[in-house]
């Protein structure tokens, strides 16, 4: 038996008038999901424990079977694992976004945050700007590292963990009341704005109609994590397929292998099919028992408030990931169990993560159960199944028998 998780990040949402009181998942054309729904187990699962922030960090730890209340030490340290940063126990790492601010007249704190991803800046451009930040903000005890896309890292030696606001939580708002109380962090952010807004690369971006990546933004602080081995805990040899450092970092911490897929970038125009084909090959030819396919696009489009683009991302997951995985495993004659779900909702109208339970679909190629007419938030909720401890859902995937 082979096992697959297809994690469509932020896919769930809320009903909105724009879509005729439907969610983006309900509005999307998803023939593969809806073919599976009548013969699969559907239900709801709470991936974010009560009292914890609804982030992809806590939620994906839950999906992987790690109780965030026991294992979560902050988002950035997980990304540090992926980048290869060697953290000491006394170090603190911070996520360092390249963001777009409004460039209005007045002080730094008067600016409005327009985009947490600087128009999904690519890694090549971002690396140029992070190098400029390294040179312009050099300071004893602090070191910057290049990550992926708009997502980068600051390491503080012998630091302390402080509460910081994720930039995607305050889109369109003035930043003053959300800036760090820590003077060193705030000074670096302010200086980065003066350094980056006049950078030649940002001048070129403006001419191309793109938002400038004109400030760094710190959040997600934490200390070195310590995850138990996925293989020892489950008895399965697993592989992670994702474009983002957070998921790759969880894989490193869990002792799982990672597959880099050319053209996978964490955006709307990622290599969906490449991820699916990589998973099929890993399971059918390379000796893996378990594959985790993470697709960031629905979440990014939710943050950007782009309704049709989020629908398109969900449709791409349906056709180019789920459809390709099913056909690949069926063609090879493999028995398999597949879990489809988001990690958390990212509703279009709020443009950030929320902590409601998420809908899941669990399919077993060797048997069918009485499911629902389609896969959606509504049909999953109507089943009455609700995993309040969402981190236990993976145990259900890896066990025999469905509800």
Image: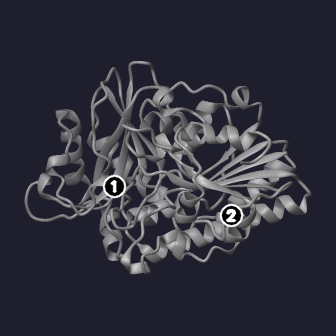
Local SS, label 1: helix
Q: Is residue 197 left or right of residue 298?
A: left
Q: Is residue 128 visible?
A: yes
> Image quadrant of residue 317?
bottom right
**Measured along the vertical axis of the image, is residue 161 above or below residue 47?**
above
- Which residue is at a point 77% across and 57% down the rendered structure image? 369
Query: Residue 80, image x and y in percent?
Result: 48, 35
| Circle 2: element type | helix
Q: Relative to residue 276, is residue 355 drawn left or right? A: left
Q: Do callouts 1 and 2 mark residues in contact (Cβ within 8 Å)?
A: no
* Depth order, front residue of 332/252: 332
Q: Residue at image x 17%, y 34%? A: 183
- Judge by depth and name the residue closer to the eye, 397 or 116: 397
- Identify the residue at horizontal 28%, vertical 60% (top origin): 171
Crowding around mark 1 (Cα neighbors within 10 Å: few <14, some 14 to 19, many 20+) is many
Residue visible at 76% across and 39% down in the picture: 399
Drawn side of residue 206 relative to residue 43, left or right: left
Separation of residues labelled 1 and 2 (CA atoms): 26 Å
Which class describes the residues within 10 Å of circle 2: few (<14), some (14-19), or many (20+)? many
- State the residue position of label 1: 168
Above or below: residue 25 compared with residue 140? below
Residue 365 x %, y %:
83, 56
The answer, for residue 257, to whether it is visible in the render is no
Report the residue marked by disc 2. Answer: 321
């Amino acid at each position: 038996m082979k096992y697959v998780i297809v994690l469509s990040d932020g896919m769930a949402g809320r009903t909105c008038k724009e879509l005729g009181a439907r969610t983006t998942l309900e509005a999307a054309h998803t023939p593969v999901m809806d073919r599976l729904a009548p013969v699969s187990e559907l239900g709801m699962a709470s991936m974010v424990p009560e009292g914890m922030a609804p982030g992809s960090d806590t939620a994906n730890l839950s999906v992987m079977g790690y109780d965030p209340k026991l294992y979560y030490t902050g988002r950035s340290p997980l990304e540090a694992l992926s980048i290869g940063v060697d953290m000491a126990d006394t170090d603190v790492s911070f996520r360092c976004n390249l963001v777009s601010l409004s460039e209005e007249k007045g002080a730094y704190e008067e600016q409005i945050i327009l985009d947490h991803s600087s128009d999904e800046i690519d890694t090549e451009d971002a690396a140029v700007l992070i190098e400029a930040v390294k040179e312009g903000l050099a300071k004893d005890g602090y070191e910057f590292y290049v990550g992926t896309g708009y997502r980068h890292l600051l390491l503080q030696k012998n630091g302390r963990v402080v509460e910081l606001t994720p930039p995607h939580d305050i889109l369109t708002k003035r930043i003053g009341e959300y800036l760090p109380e820590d003077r060193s962090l705030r000074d670096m952010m302010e200086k980065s704005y003066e350094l980056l807004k006049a950078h030649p690369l940002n001048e070129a971006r403006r001419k191309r109609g793109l938002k400038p990546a004109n400030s760094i933004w710190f959040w997600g602080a934490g200390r070195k994590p310590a995850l138990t081995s996925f293989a020892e805990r489950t008895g399965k040899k697993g592989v992670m397929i994702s474009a983002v450092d957070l998921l790759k970092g969880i894989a490193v911490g869990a002792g799982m292998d990672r597959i880099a897929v050319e053209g996978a970038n964490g955006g709307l125009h990622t290599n969906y099919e490449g991820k699916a084909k990589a998973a099929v090959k890993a399971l059918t030819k390379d000796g893996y028992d378990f594959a985790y396919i993470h697709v960031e696009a629905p979440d990014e489009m939710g943050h950007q408030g782009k309704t049709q683009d989020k629908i398109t991302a969900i449709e791409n997951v349906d056709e180019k990931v789920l459809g390709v995985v099913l056909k690949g495993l069926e063609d090879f004659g493999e028995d398999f169990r597949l879990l489809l779900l988001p990690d958390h909702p990212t509703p279009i109208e709020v443009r950030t993560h929320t902590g409601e339970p998420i809908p899941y679909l669990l399919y077993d190629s060797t048997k069918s159960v009485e499911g629902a007419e389609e896969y959606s938030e509504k049909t999953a909720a109507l089943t009455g199944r609700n995993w309040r401890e969402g981190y236990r859902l993976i145990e259900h995937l890896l066990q025999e028998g469905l509800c």
